[in-house]
């Protein structure tokens, strides 16, 4: 169902004997759901765009539009980029999926990359990363570091990708600390620094001493630094914002994928498809440890990262029970990709309920 990144890059880097020659640089457009900040979701995609420029030089001309709301605004911006001659357009936000598909129908000669989307078309490909792999290891770090046995999690929307992260974090935490619990606050938004901060502060007031998040700003990290708590950075290394609070970062690396896809268009080799890469493909990694993390824990986590990349360690291996006491997966089995992609439950140890 999903191609791996290595195969995608290999296909993208294939050069025919008579390569397509562009007199003008190929135009590539990027649409960002939030402003470009020093760290976070949008920052990592901006680093990916810069990697395209660095790798392909004068043969490509990239452009971006930042802080574009999902919905009608996104559709307008994506359409404008297509009209301006961009031959490949990257739209890295789940809420951009439908606008991307709609505009793609109007511009069949333009290629579109719906990042975190799941619907494809003849000129629309999808790509995502197995963020949950990093979340599991971050949970191990949190389980080793917590003193209250209570972690907080500031979450955007209850979509499968976010549920994967929460559940993997809880499973990782409880794999080394069975008494650990995870308390979730749902924001139903991706980017609002003031609300992200408010949620973090509320969790700290409930005895949480380590926090993770799935939102777009650095506000949770800043709140942890202010309160003297511990935090897991997401998307980017955030030690500049939280030098004492950060215990580990789960980072996303988009440069290789973006470069490969632009090269594929340049060489006439672009094809639609799905990519879901993780640690094996270099799209997700953990590291960037803070000063509070003992060397023994750092060594343990880097070793486990290698095990995840090799497939020896699977975050969603049974037995798994949901937080209502129902057995989801027996021992000796692991969730399939289809099951992970459709995740709609919270595991044991996560406090709260989902709105069905």
Image (tube, rainbow, N blue to C red):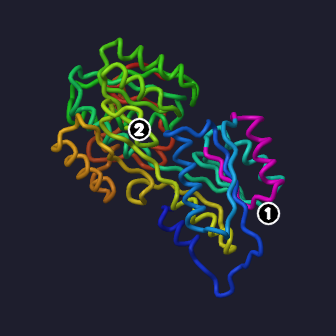
Q: Label 2 neighbourhood size at 10 Å, few (<14), some (14-19), many (20+)?
A: many
Magenta segment range? 69-92
Quarter of image, res 139: top left
Q: Are marks 1 and 2 in contact (CB under 8 Å)?
A: no
Quadrant of the snapshot with the C terminus: top right
Viewer-nearest residue: 140 or 348? 140
Question: 209 left or right of 355?
Answer: left
Quarter of image, res 192: top right
Kindly identify which residue carries mark 1: 109
Q: Which mark is residue 166?
A: none
Q: Position of residue 290 (x, y in %)?
A: 28, 38
Task: Name the secondary structure under disc 2.
Answer: loop
Viewer-nearest residue: 37 or 251? 37
In this rendering, is residue 264 above or below 198?
Answer: below
Q: Position of residue 185 (x, y in %)?
A: 46, 20
Question: 150 left or right of 279?
Answer: left
Give the residue drawn at x 82%, y 55%.
Answer: 84
How far apart are the alpha carbons under marks 1 and 2?
39 Å
**Badge nearest the viewer, 1 or 2:** 2
Magenta stretch contains residue 72: yes
Quarter of image, res 74: top right
Residue that lies at the very extreme toward the bottom in this rendered image: 17
Magenta stretch contains residue 322: no
Kindly identify which residue carries mark 2: 238
Give the residue drawn at x 44%, y 43%.
Answer: 236
């Amino acid at each position: 169902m999903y191609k791996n990144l290595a195969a995608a890059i290999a296909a993208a880097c294939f050069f025919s004997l008579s390569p397509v020659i562009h007199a003008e640089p190929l135009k590539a457009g990027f649409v960002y759901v939030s402003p470009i900040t020093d760290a976070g979701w949008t920052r990592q995609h901006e680093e990916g765009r810069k990697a395209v420029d660095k790798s392909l030089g004068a043969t490509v001309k990239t452009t971006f539009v930042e802080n574009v709301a999902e919905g009608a605004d996104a559709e307008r911006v994506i359409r404008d980029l297509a009209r301006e001659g961009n031959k490949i357009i990257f739209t890295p936000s789940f809420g951009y999926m439908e606008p991307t598909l709609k505009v793609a129908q109007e511009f069949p000669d333009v290629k579109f990359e719906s990042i975190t989307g799941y619907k494809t078309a003849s000129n629309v490909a999808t790509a995502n990363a197995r963020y949950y792999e990093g979340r599991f290891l971050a949970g191990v770090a949190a389980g080793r570091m917590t003193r209250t046995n209570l972690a907080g999690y500031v979450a955007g929307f209850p979509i499968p990708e976010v549920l994967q992260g929460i559940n993997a974090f809880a499973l990782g935490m409880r794999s080394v600390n069975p008494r650990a619990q995870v308390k979730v606050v749902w924001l139903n938004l991706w980017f609002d620094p003031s609300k992200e901060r408010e949620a973090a502060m509320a969790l700290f007031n409930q005895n949480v001493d380590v926090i993770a998040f799935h939102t777009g700003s650095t506000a949770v990290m800043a709140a942890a630094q202010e309160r003297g708590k511990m935090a897991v950075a997401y998307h980017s290394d955030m030690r500049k914002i939280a030098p004492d609070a950060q215990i580990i970062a789960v980072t996303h690396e988009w440069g290789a994928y973006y470069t490969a896809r632009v090269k594929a268009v340049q060489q006439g080799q672009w094809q639609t498809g799905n990519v879901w890469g993780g640690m094996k493909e270099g799209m997700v990694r953990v590291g960037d440890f803070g000063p509070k993390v003992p060397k023994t824990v750092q060594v343990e986590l880097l070793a486990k990262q290698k095990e995840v990349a090799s497939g020896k360690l699977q975050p969603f291996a049974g037995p798994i029970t949901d937080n209502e006491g129902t057995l989801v997966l027996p021992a000796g089995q692991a969730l399939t990709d289809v099951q992970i992609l459709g995740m709609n439950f919270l595991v044991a140890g996560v406090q709260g309920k989902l709105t069905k």
